[in-house]
Image (spheres, coloured by chain):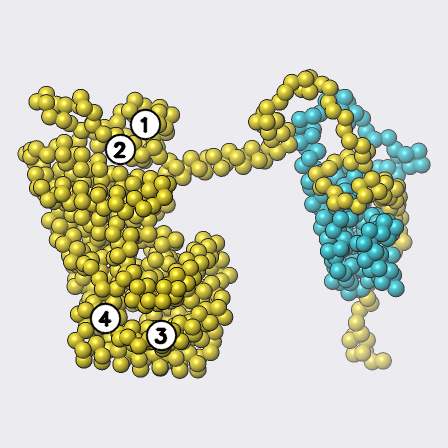
């Protein structure tokens, strides 16, 4: 053996520890354990024999010492009947202090939610922007199987609910059998998109292929085109998500061919203006070839990201032009529009830069544009930073309501902002524009015909009425519009179950208060134009119009200097009560509330006196208002 | 051979064979009690915790399709049972402690006649040092002194080779020496 061999020889392997004092001590220690454990063996077997092999309660303590049932107590407590509540309290106090702490935390949490309903909306700027992007991007991220990255229970539940809703609606639509009466297109699309978002690929593909078969059987134009290319495109999307690029490309190409046929058909037959509400045609109307998205998707599938990016840029530029012209942005300047585009490009570039193959940049550019447009508004109007675009639960509806949003949502947003800013002439113009976009549609089941659309139009009338009243309180049209809106809400509530009816009416109960104010204070006064009649109501978080639609909590919007003057001396109190969970805004003037000349005057609830829910909530109300800095 | 016996005992105990369960108890009770001694205030408390651990595992024996899973569950459950019992004892003491209890607790446990004062002191120091050991090292010591085939068990349960097991054992002993204040490596 050479010296090298010896040096290469592995070191001696470790073996059992030596027999030393420590070893002896350890042996004695473990012997003690073993003996004590062996001594308990009989106890254990006896207990098992007593229990007859039944499962053992883990809470049982000292069960071995006292296997017999405990005799009833004869002490002081046993002589008194103990109320169940008392027993519970004693049990909690004696055994579960942690549960008491949990209960306290729960109560504190509930109180915080009730007293600070808009805490989440107080976040500003970038944080809000991130939220918006999360809302917009969650489904596509999930579609790529990035479920662990977005393990958001709320999103999951929303998607599950959306799938259930879509499936039931689809079944109902198919059961009718009359395609004109109930077109299952949207329900079907929604169904397999949500299935895809949840990662249920097989189900999504099955539904999409069923939809494709249904679309191919369609013989009526223009559905023959639009359903067909949509179905092909969606099937391609699913194959893309599954990683089958070749098949996806085949479907995309087929879809592109049908989309081109459709474009030709629309131009040839002059049907473009009629199809204005349709998103596809709307894009055509603004000069955006709808198949630009498909071209971008195809390029992305083929790995040509530069081409995909070019297509995306072209689409973005065209859409930007459209948005510039849109009435939603009439209050914004051109540089603002440019920054909108920059934002859009930045977001899409981010997508490209991160090489998210599952999310071709062009597909969601419209979503980006919409979201970024709102972000832009937040940038330009920091006071509106609390604006929530939509709740997570609203997403399924949003997916479906592209055109509705395009036609209605932006003007409505502009209208609300204009009123909050005290720009009433502009608000009236925005209301007129929105009204033009929400006329009767030829497609049954279109959102405008659904309750949500009816309520939206009612709100439009209400907002227009408040704007008119702010400009001229004697304008008879103002009150007429508001009354009409109130009637619509009541008519819409009638077929609903009682609890939903109450819920709906409470959401709109402020409108009645505004009408009352207009009636009570209908006499023109000097400087009345500076006193926005709708300010009080719109400034309340209770003026949330309806949940599925975009909710702008105007309480967080600071009115312009011109608009901050409120004629009602009771504004502070009203505001205070609006913050209260009791919703004391419905307090009406009393019969004896008259001024010196005998005319009726409005009156605000006096905290702790007129408060309908009593002094306790009034105190909470005061405290809450104090926390909000409104006192 | 021994392993297959233990596996068959596990299967038999799952069907209600108490004798088989007793044999399982014999094999593992020492280690379980040793683990409990770390987390309990007294040896008696540790004994109760060890027995409760076995009482908990008895109704669910049919869930363990393999011996390593049974062993892993048993040793993990030991920690949980001890923690729960400590919390329960805290609550009991807070709400139910009487003067008599306090008086009894203030009295030190009497040593057994066979154990001299020096032995008791050594064992107490060793118990304190064992308490301070990392869990893996402590488990290795318990396995070595209480298991019939510690190296094989360690290979299965701790995923250690035989040399690795003895290396861990040596490290545990060195730590013990330091912790017991003897100052010299064993």
Residue A612 relative to residue A561: left or right: right
Q: CA distance from mark 2 to mark 1?
A: 9 Å
Q: Position of residue A486 (x, y in %)?
A: 22, 42
Which residue is drawn at the image coordinates 49% and 66% (left, top)? Answer: A200
- Mark nearer the viewer, 3 or 1: 3
Image colour assigned to chain A: yellow
Which residue is denoted by mark 2 in the rendering? A586
**Tag 2–tag 1 contact (CB < 8 Å):** yes
Sequence-wise, which precedes: disc 2 or disc 1?
2
**Tag 3–tag 2 contact (CB < 8 Å):** no
Which residue is denoted by mark 1 in the rendering? A612
Q: CA distance from mark 3 to mark 1?
A: 57 Å
Sequence-wise, which precedes: disc 3 or disc 2?
3
Quarter of the image holding residue A295? bottom left
Image colour assigned to chain B: cyan
Sequence-wise, which precedes: disc 4 or disc 2?
4
Sequence-wise, which precedes: disc 3 or disc 1?
3
SS at circle 2? helix
- Mark nearer the viewer, 3 or 4: 3
Sequence-wise, which precedes: disc 3 or disc 4?
3
Q: Position of residue A284 (x, y in %)?
A: 22, 72
Determine if marks 2 and 1 fall on one subunit. yes
Asked whether A60 or A200 is in front, the reply is A200
Which residue is drawn at the image coordinates 15% and 50% (left, top)? Answer: A427
Could you classify mark 4 by the number of other residues whose Cα lies within 10 Å: few (under 14), some (14-19), or many (20 or more)?
many
Which residue is denoted by mark 3 in the rendering? A215
Q: Position of residue A211 (x, y in %)?
A: 40, 72
Which residue is denoted by mark 4 in the rendering? A281
């Amino acid at each position: 053996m050479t010296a090298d061999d010896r040096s290469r020889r592995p070191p001696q392997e470790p073996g059992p520890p030596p027999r030393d004092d420590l070893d002896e001590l350890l042996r004695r220690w473990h012997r003690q354990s073993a003996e004590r454990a062996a001594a308990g063996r009989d106890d254990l077997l006896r207990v098992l024999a007593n229990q007859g092999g039944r499962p053992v309660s883990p809470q049982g303590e000292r069960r071995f010492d006292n296997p017999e049932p405990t005799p009833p107590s004869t002490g002081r407590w046993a002589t008194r009947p103990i109320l169940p509540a008392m027993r519970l309290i004693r049990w909690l106090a004696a055994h579960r202090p942690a549960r008491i702490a949990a209960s306290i935390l729960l109560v504190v949490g509930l109180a915080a939610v009730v007293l600070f309903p808009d805490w989440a909306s107080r976040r500003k700027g970038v944080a809000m922007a991130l939220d918006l992007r999360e809302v917009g991007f969650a489904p596509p991220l999930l579609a790529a199987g990035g479920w662990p990255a977005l393990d958001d229970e709320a999103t999951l539940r929303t998607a599950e609910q959306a799938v259930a809703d879509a499936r039931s609606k689809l079944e109902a639509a198919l059961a009718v059998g009359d395609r004109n009466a109930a077109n299952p297109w949207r329900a079907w699309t929604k169904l397999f998109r949500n299935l895809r978002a949840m990662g249920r690929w097989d189900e999504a593909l099955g539904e999409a292929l069923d939809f494709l078969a249904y679309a191919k059987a369609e013989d009526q134009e223009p559905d023959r085109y639009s359903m067909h290319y949509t179905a092909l495109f969606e099937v391609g999307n699913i194959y893309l998500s599954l990683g089958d690029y070749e098949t996806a490309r085949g479907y995309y190409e087929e879809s592109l061919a049908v989309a081109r046929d459709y474009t030709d058909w629309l131009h040839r037959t002059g049907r473009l203006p009629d199809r204005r509400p349709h998103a596809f045609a709307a894009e055509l109307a603004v000069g955006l070839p709808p198949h630009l998205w498909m071209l971008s998707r195809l390029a992305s599938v083929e790995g040509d990201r530069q081409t995909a990016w070019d297509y995306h840029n072209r689409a973005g530029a065209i859409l930007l032009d459209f948005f510039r012209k849109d009435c939603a942005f009439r209050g914004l300047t051109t540089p603002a529009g440019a920054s909108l585009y920059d934002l859009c490009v930045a977001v899409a570039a981010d997508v490209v830069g991160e090489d998210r193959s599952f999310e071709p940049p062009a597909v969601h550019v419209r979503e980006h544009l919409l979201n970024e447009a709102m972000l832009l508004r937040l940038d330009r109007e920091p006071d509106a930073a609390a604006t929530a675009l939509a709740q997570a639960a609203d997403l399924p509806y949003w997916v479906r309501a592209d055109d509705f949003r395009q036609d209605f949502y932006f003007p409505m947003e502009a209208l609300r902002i204009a009123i909050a800013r005290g720009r009433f002439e502009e608000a009236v113009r925005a209301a007129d524009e929105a009204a033009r976009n929400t006329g009767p549609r030829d497609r049954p089941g279109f959102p405008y015909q659904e309750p949500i659309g009816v309520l939206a139009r009612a709100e439009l009338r209400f907002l227009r009425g408040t704007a008119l009243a702010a400009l001229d309180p004697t304008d008879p049209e103002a009150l007429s519009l508001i009354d009409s809106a109130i009637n619509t809400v009541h008519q819409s509530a009638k077929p609903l179950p009682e609890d939903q009816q109450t819920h709906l009416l409470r959401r709109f109960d402020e409108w009645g208060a505004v009408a009352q104010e207009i009636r009570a204070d209908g006499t023109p006064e000097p400087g009345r134009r500076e006193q926005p009649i709708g300010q009080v109501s719109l400034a309340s978080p209770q003026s949330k119009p309806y949940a599925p639609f975009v909710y702008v909590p105007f309480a967080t919007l600071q009115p312009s200097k011109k608009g901050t003057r409120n004629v009602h001396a009771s504004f502070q109190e009203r505001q205070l009560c609006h913050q209260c969970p009791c919703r004391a805004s419905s307090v009406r003037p009393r019969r004896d509330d008259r001024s010196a000349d005998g005319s009726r005057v409005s009156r605000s609830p006096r905290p702790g006196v007129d408060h309908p829910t009593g002094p306790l909530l009034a105190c909470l109300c005061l405290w809450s208002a104090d926390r909000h800095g409104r006192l | 051979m021994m392993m297959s016996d233990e596996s068959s005992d596990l299967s038999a105990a799952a069907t209600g064979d108490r004798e088989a369960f007793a044999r399982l108890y014999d094999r593992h009770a020492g280690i379980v009690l040793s683990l409990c001694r770390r987390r309990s205030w007294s040896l008696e408390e540790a004994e109760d915790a060890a027995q409760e651990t076995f009482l908990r595992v008895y109704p669910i024996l049919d869930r363990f399709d393999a011996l390593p899973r049974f062993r892993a569950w048993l040793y993990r459950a030991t920690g949980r049972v001890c923690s729960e019992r400590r919390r329960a004892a805290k609550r009991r003491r807070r709400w139910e402690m009487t003067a008599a209890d306090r008086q009894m607790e203030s009295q030190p446990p009497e040593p057994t006649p066979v154990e001299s004062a020096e032995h008791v002191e050594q064992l107490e120091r060793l118990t304190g040092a064992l308490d301070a050991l990392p869990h893996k090292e402590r488990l290795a010591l318990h396995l070595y002194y209480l298991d019939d085939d510690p190296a094989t068990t360690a290979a299965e349960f701790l995923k250690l080779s035989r040399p690795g097991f003895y290396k861990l054992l040596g490290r545990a002993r060195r730590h013990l020496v330091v912790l017991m204040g003897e100052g010299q490596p064993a």
